[in-house]
Image (spheres, rainbow, N blue to C red):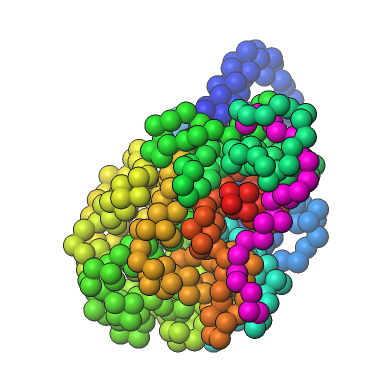
Amino acid sequence: MVNRSWTLTAAVGVVGLGLALAYRSRLASVGGGWGRIVDLIGERALTIYLWQGFGLLAAAHLVRSSDLPSAFADVVALVVVGVTVGVAVFVFGPLEDRAGGRRSSLPVPPRATVALGAVIVLALVGASVAFTAPTGANSDVATSRSESGLPLSGRAALDRAELVEESLVTGADDEVAIPESAQVASDPAKVGASGKGEPGKSDEVGDLSVPERLAVVTERWLDTHAEDLAEIGFSSLSAAVVVEGAGAWSIEWNRSGAGVLVSPAAAGGSAPGTGRVFPWWSLTKAATATWLMRSVEAGLVRLDDPLSRWVPESPRSADMTLEQLARHTAGLPRDAGLPFIVSTPADDVGSWFDDGQLLFEPGTGFNYSRTGYHLLALALERAEGRAWTDAMSDLAAQSGAVVRFDDEGSQLREPTDPDRRGYRGGLWASGGLRSTPVDAAQFFHWVGHGGLRSSSVDAITAFSTDADRWFYGLGVTPRCPCRVEGDRLQAAAFGADGPGGSMASRLDGVATVVLAPDSWFEGDAPRREFFDLELQLLAAAA
């Protein structure tokens, strides 16, 4: 919870520092063995601070790649962190002593320090490569249903695919539509803090206004899943629903509040109740795919253009197309083998240029790839002659929304996009957008209902019928009910997922929903209760 808020982080730091100063004399009076431990921690504070993160990464890799019971895995992780920090303290401690003007309490010769430090750094680099390297052209990694190694947005998309597989109806003649039963339309319900109705009064949900229906559905969902959701730290929800012909509605709830608040909201964050700004993460891929289709409509690119037309310096560029990059079927690795926390788009693309090893031949498999979307955006920038950020701002303006970028406030001095057009962030075209839920809902409602030609929407939502390819379209995944018709999966809606929330838009044009909960993952897997809420809100909007 603290790490999600700069304000809380600062507050905890200030309180911790205040307590240390308040009890300074008592800490200074600690003697004996405990006093020596206190002194050692103080003398090695910088080394501990710098190296505990490496210990955490090492522990995460080792524990995730094992089948240890969860309780034992926590013990193993603690030991790994302790050993990493202990070795760092022993090796680099003398340097910290010298910097602090102290006589070293660990008399390790300088040459030995340098040698051991070099060994540690090389070992870390080697371990990073070993943990992230492709395992062969026909590797099971390419089509595995396992969640290991996937970003959180990928795990959510994979769970969506499993739901699709469970609910598929093959050869059905019925029209694919969100079932109105999802809104529990015939049950009496309490109308909460929606601004209309009397609390405690029974009404037929079908007879309620749009905001009342949205409030009822959300309140029932919260009541039904309250205990389970509390276990993952879920304590607040910002959401938005755009209803065709009825405007945009903001949904706000937090555990300490009076209830669910549903209020009219305007895009652009100009009206109260529009919700907090949340990171889109992989919802950004759907926006980048939208730019791809707008470029196709303008005749600037074609879906079957080889990458070599725009990025000839890329390895195997003549063998993959822009459409394959957007569908994650080009055979590219997820992130070109670089640690996510330190990589930039330029690093990611540069690493791919240096390596150039595909996981499989383009078009023959599926692998969720951040690198693929970086190459796609690079091609589109060159084709249109403008930056990705400019294109996103322009699309948002046309939709009536306002978007922000993850490089706002960045302290990086140099551009981090491959062609150095000025972007200074870490996620770019694969996950670098942010906005309020209302703006996100406005944007994606426009995409499916007026922002693109119907043929372009058809292309984006031409979902694969192959479960191993996650039924993926162009930057989006299906929202069921779904059925198979020939070689295409027909869905009732399209959407996208990310660690910060999810989006779903009905293909019949009725409504678009965006959820931005403060927590919706349990460990590495999303809680499917949020998938249910998405479906119920889409139905209630009708």
Residue drawn where x is 60% and y is 65% of the image: 177
Side (left or right) of 180 relative to 453: right
Residue drawn where x is 22% and y is 71% of the image: 300
Question: Is residue 191 visible to the viewer in this orientation of the structure?
Answer: yes
Q: Position of residue 2 (x, y in %)?
A: 60, 34
Residue drawn where x is 42% and y is 37% of the image: 266
Residue drawn where x is 78% and y is 45% of the image: 187
> Vertically, is 231 above or below 67?
above
Magenta residues, dominant SS class: loop
Side (left or right) of 480 relative to 320: right
Q: Position of residue 341 (x, y in %)?
A: 48, 53
Residue 178 colored magenta? yes
Which range is magenta? 172-194
Q: Which residue is most to the front?
A: 207
Q: Where is residue 20 in the image (x, y as percent from the top left)?
A: 62, 19
- Viewer-nearest residue: 101 or 250: 250
Question: Is residue 317 visible to the viewer in this orientation of the structure?
Answer: no
- Viewer-nearest residue: 316 or 497: 497
- Viewer-nearest residue: 185 or 43: 185
Q: Position of residue 100 (x, y in %)?
A: 46, 31
Side (left or right) of 527 relative to 127: right
Image quadrant assignment for residue 527:
bottom right
Which quarter of the figure is the N terminus placed in? top right
Residue 383 colored magenta? no
Number of residue marks: 0
